[in-house]
Image (cartoon, grey):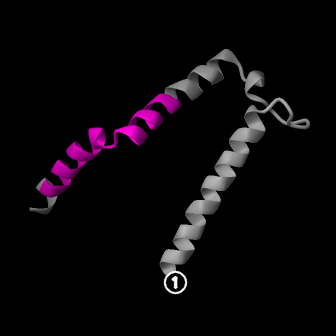
Amino acid sequence: MVTAVLATTVLLTAAYSFWMLTYTSSSTAVDGPTLADATRIEQTTLLYLLIPNLILGIYPSAIEGPLMASCINLLY
């Protein structure tokens, strides 16, 4: 039961995130903000947040290895 609720929550969160990204980056949004409305500093900040997310999404063991090693040292 708990697994079903958690899985549903994850799926709804992903769907909402995709919808919000499409809404904010689309030029067809009615009276809504678009990515073109962002200043250069906001776009740069978004880029600096996006790059680590992409890298860790594709290659998660870059951070998983050191984290696992430190957790093992704490436990044993």
- What residue is at 71 percent from the left and 19 percent from the top? 39
Q: Please provide percent x and percent y for residue 55.
A: 40, 33
Look at the picture and state if 32 lies above or below 3. Answer: above
What x and y, as percent, mark residue 70? 18, 49
Q: Quadrant of the C terminus?
A: bottom left
Depicted 16 relative to depicted 53: above or below? below
- Residue that lies at the very extreme toward the right in this rendered image: 30
Residue located 40% across and 39% down the image: 58
Q: Which residue occupies 55% across, 25% down?
A: 47
Give, as a three-letter code, the residue at label 1.
Met
Count of numbered badges drawn on the protein: 1
Q: Nearer the viewer, residue 7 or 40?
A: 7
| Magenta span contains residue 35 | no
Magenta stretch: dominant secondary structure = helix
> In the rendered structure, does residue 60 fall within the stretch colored magenta?
yes
Q: Nearer the viewer, residue 10 or 38?
A: 10
The answer to whether 72 appears left or right of 7 in the picture is left
Q: Is residue 59 left or right of residue 54?
A: left
For label 1, the crowd category at 10 Å Cα-Cα, with few meaning under 14, some 14 to 19 and many 20 or more, is few
Q: Is residue 21 left or right of residue 1?
A: right
- Residue occupied by mark 1: 1
> What residue do we see at 22% from left, 45% from top?
65
The span picked out in magenta is 49-72
Query: Outermost residue toward the left?
Result: 76
Q: Residue furthest top?
A: 40
Q: Secondary structure at mark 1?
A: loop
